[in-house]
Amino acid sequence: MLKNVNGFWEGRAVLVTGAGGYTGSALVKRLAAEGARVRAFVRRNGSRRPLPEGVEPFEGNLAVPADCERATRGIDTVFNVAAVFRRVGGGRSEMEAVHVGATESLLRAAKEAGCRRFVHTSTMGVHGHVEESPGDEESPYSPGDDYQETKLEGELLARRLAPELGVPLAVVRPCGIYGPGDTRFLKLVRPIDRGLFLMLGRGTIHMRLTYIHDLVDGFLLAGQKDEAVGEVFLVGEDRSIALRDLAKVIAGLLRVKAPRMRIPVWPVYAAGWLCELLCAPFGIEPPLHRRRVAFFTKNRSFRVDKARRELGYEPKVSAEEGFRRVIEWYRAENLL
């Protein structure tokens, strides 16, 4: 974990959007521990995680420019972490409102408030499948769904508008986020634990993960370092890992046999397409998505050399250690 040696965040007024979610709440907790005066933007009547003592909750709607303007008053640094994740019934319009429209409103509000720094959260997903591995910040854009497309639209808008407004901007593209308190990888860990995991394809595609504490380090550096202004940074673990190797690591931590069963990809992809087609008109969550199949087929191997070189970013938690902690939490929560 990055140490705030110079007391940089002590007493600074900071706004975190998406503070009710997994990533935003982790950032809020860390900033509060560093002595920042944190304003946590949470959805009005939305679900949220508990906020640390002393954090100022701000209930509002990011799609309302007036709420963005009120939230940024007196703020030194904005961390725009809010996101609308893929779900049945959400629709592209909601994603556009938060990923694109709210980004513009927040940037304009930050200009009026005289904010020192605006840190915008994008995603490695804007690159889609990496043809030339490992990829970096200059790899071609190839978003694969509404979420990734609207995140890219929001990032490009921020990078275009911030210089026009004179708002110092830094963009962080997190790689696959995980850690205790989050269940997104439960659908991988649980089948391995029960001996039911099926590898689609050969499992040779690589992925770059980001343990939540390392990601928060990256955010703080982007908000602190002068070198971050006007730049984009991929943030992830020390190395990429092949999916089959990750499965072996998880199996070892669970003390079960490593998965060996493999099945072809495309029949399952076709089944996912059919499930989506049949379930969408009824607002039912499909039992199988094409994006879940894409987890087995898209290469997401990236370098984080730029963040290391320009920000002094240094990931601390390996996949082995990170999943050890995650599995401990799953067990504590009776999820395994």
Image (tube, rainbow, N blue to C red):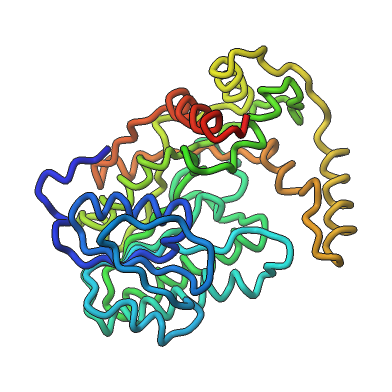
Decide: is 164 above or below 279: below
Q: How many marks?
A: 0
Q: Is residue 103 above or below residue 209?
A: below
Name the quadrant containing residue 42.
bottom left
Viewer-proximal residue, 159 or 22? 22
Residue at point 47%, 24% (across, down): 324
- Horizontal side of 266 relative to 129 (left or right) equals right
- Residue at image point 38% right, 59% down: 171
Answer with left or right where residue 226 lies relative to residue 205: left
**Quadrant placement of the N terminus:** top left
- Answer with the quarter of the image where residue 2 lies: top left
Give the image location of residue 224, x and y in percent.
Answer: 21, 56
The residue sitting at the left extreme is 6
Residue 23: x and y in percent read 44, 52
What residue is drawn where x is 57% and y is 42%?
183
Q: Quadrant of the C terminus?
A: top right
In the image, taking residue 275 as reference, residue 215 lies left or right, namely: left
